[in-house]
Amino acid sequence: MGNGVREGQVDFKRQDVEPVASTHLPSEGVQEQKKVLNSLMSGALAGAVAKTAVAPLDRTKIMFQVSSKRFSAKEAYRLIYHTYLNEGFWSLWRGNSATMVRVIPYAAIQFCAHEEYKQLLGSYYGFQGKALTPFPRFIAGSLAGTTAAMLTYPLDMVRARMAVTPKEMYSNIVHVFIRISREEGLKTLYRGFTPTILGVIPYAGLSFFTYETLKKLHADHSGKSQPSPPERLLFGACAGLIGQSASYPLDVVRRRMQTAGVMGHTYSSILLTMQEIIREEGLIRGLYKGLSMNWVKGPIAVGISFTTFDLTQILLRKLQHSTNVEREETRRQLHPTAKVRYRPTRRVSG
């Protein structure tokens, strides 16, 4: 002690702490951002792949929905063949560019919103990290569909116009917006909005509900945590069949109201549109026109959509995990002894 130095006194004040490289997981906010981005990307791809696969059938269905022609499988085939002969093979995908402009943001928003609503409802009902019960499962799907429809509706209107008009009338998507705004008013871009929302609630609700329920039943009975791709396609097909059948009459009404300006009709409300369709074409033949084609097209599209979304999500998670592992290995090689975030310094006082 004669030298006046006290040894062994350590001060852990912040100004005497030296930072060193340390292992740390991404913050909760960063993880949430990555999760949302993954959902948006997966949803966008799912919508694009599914709609492109069934575009010719979808265009044919719309053309029957907006006309007074009687639907049959033979007539549908004849229309497709006639279109191919007169306008060429790629004309079967006419309006698909407008469909992509609408479907990519629609599907991205819908799938992402569904994941977020599931999380919110899980927290509210106390099912955080677990499968939701049936009613919240239906609500999550309905809210997701409604959110997406509200944000992308004008694009759906444009797509319907392009599907039922000759290419000489509208040259591209921008041209449709310009002509509708100039000749019919901006309000026309939201014509048919109410039946769309009323149709989306049961359609999206039942679709997501059916798909999630079938996956849960599969996990409970098979012991496997995840279904195979063919099983996902089958579950999605069942979801599409149920959801579209429940909301189909409102889909017909929506298309009639959207295309009224170019088809020579005037529809002022949902009820008046329904009444006119029933009076002129009958209940079943009018409001359910093209449903049999939808039973072919719908399950294929929804099955592809759900399967693509799930598999893309799984792939993106694996890629992120691999990237994190590589970063951790690199960090360990650069800082093999770093274990703590801060290293305290020994301050010697006299």
Image (cartoon, rainbow, N blue to C red):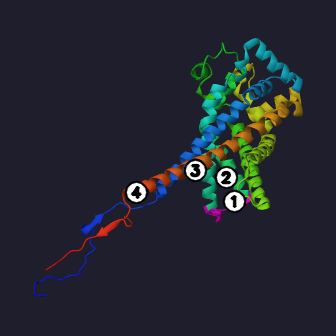
Whether residue 348 is situated above or below residue 148 in the rendered picture: below
Residue underneath mark 4 = 333
* Distance between the alpha carbons at the discs numbered 4 and 1: 43 Å
* Distance between the alpha carbons at the discs numbered 1 and 3: 25 Å
Rendering quarter of residue 284: top right
Cβ atoms at labels 2 and 1 below 8 Å apart: yes
Question: Is 75 placed left or right of 182 in the picture?
Answer: right
* Distance between the alpha carbons at the discs numbered 3 and 2: 26 Å
Residue underneath mark 2 = 140
Q: Nearer the viewer, residue 306 or 246?
A: 306
Residue underneath mark 3 = 318
* Distance between the alpha carbons at the discs numbered 2 and 1: 9 Å
Identify which residue is drawn at 62% across, 51% down: 115
> Mark 4 or mark 1: which is in front?
4
Query: Measured from the top left, where is residue 112 in percent x and y?
Result: 60, 47
Picture mark count: 4
Question: Is 344 placed left or right of 244 in the picture?
Answer: left
Residue flagged by tag 2: what amino acid is it?
A: Ala
